[in-house]
Image: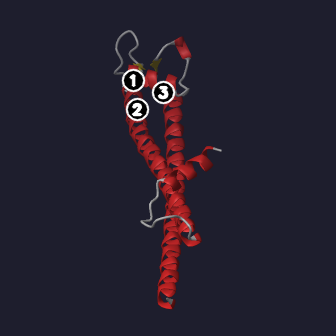
Amino acid sequence: MTQVGGLGQVMNNIDLGVGGTGSLQLQFAKLQLALSEMSKNSAMNYIDQIQKSQDEQKQVAHLLQQARQLQADAAANKGAAPHKNCTEMTPEMIKYMKENNLAWDPTGNDYLHNKDEWNVAIQSLQAHLDTLGTDTQQKMVFVQDFMGQYNSYLQGANSAIQQSNQTLAQLAQVR
């Protein structure tokens, strides 16, 4: 229901520079322009979402790199005593994984992981990164669809305005 109200509101804001709205062709042009505006707004909304998703992908890629380095450090026995063969998840990683319900190995009921325990966190981060990538690609398809609609509506409006101008020119010749 809000889209219809939104369409009416957008149509009321469109001024084609002619007094009155008696021409059916101009009314159709107004409708086409209103629909093009709505398509553009939808595309812009998805573009904003894509930018946020790409920022999150960068963050997850950074966490994934950290996890792999911590796994390598654990394998090289670079952990701090008394957990020489373990390394600890960073606070940033713990926070992100909790906020996004990502898995890690609960052995020891702590955030210390040996080389093998890191696999769970790494696989979880990688799967989440893949999901974000897929979601971003879907949003890009939606943007393309909305931009196609935008162009189509603009062409329709242009065509209706040209037809209206032709009709007015023909009427002017008759007089």
Which amino acid lies under the numbered mark 1 shown in the image of this protein?
Glu
Q: Of 97 and 20, which appears nearest the observer?
A: 20
Could you tell which of marks 3 and 1 lies nearer the N-terminus? 1
The residue at the point 50 percent across, 24 percent down is 99
Q: Of 10 and 83, which appears nearest the observer?
A: 10
Q: Of 13 and 66, which appears nearest the observer?
A: 13
The residue at the point 53 percent across, 12 percent down is 108
Which amino acid lies under the numbered mark 3 shown in the image of this protein?
Trp
Instruction: Report whether residue 146 is seen.
Output: no
The residue at the point 49 percent across, 34 percent down is 125
**Residue placed farthest to the top in the image?**
82
Front label number (3 vs 1): 1
- The answer to whether residue 68 is left or right of residue 116 is left
Is residue 64 positioned above or below 91 on the image?
Answer: below
Could you tell which of marks 2 and 1 lies nearer the N-terminus? 2
Tell me the CA gap for discs 2 and 1. Answer: 8 Å
Is residue 156 positioned above or below 98 on the image?
Answer: below
Check whether the beta carbons of the residues at disc 2 and disc 1 lie within 8 A of each other.
Answer: yes
Is residue 109 positioned above or below 115 on the image?
Answer: above
Label 1, on which residue? 92
Which amino acid lies under the numbered mark 2 shown in the image of this protein?
Leu
Question: Dot 1 surroundings within 10 Å: few (below 14), some, or many (20 or more)?
Answer: few
Q: Position of residue 91 (x, y in %)?
A: 39, 19
Tell me the CA gap for discs 3 and 1. Answer: 16 Å
Front label number (3 vs 2): 2
Label 3, on which residue? 118
Q: Secondary structure at mark 1?
A: helix
Q: Secondary structure at mark 3?
A: helix
Q: Position of residue 4 (x, y in %)?
A: 62, 50
Q: Position of residue 133 (x, y in %)?
A: 49, 46
Check whether the beta carbons of the residues at disc 3 and disc 1 lie within 8 A of each other.
Answer: no
Label 2, on which residue? 63
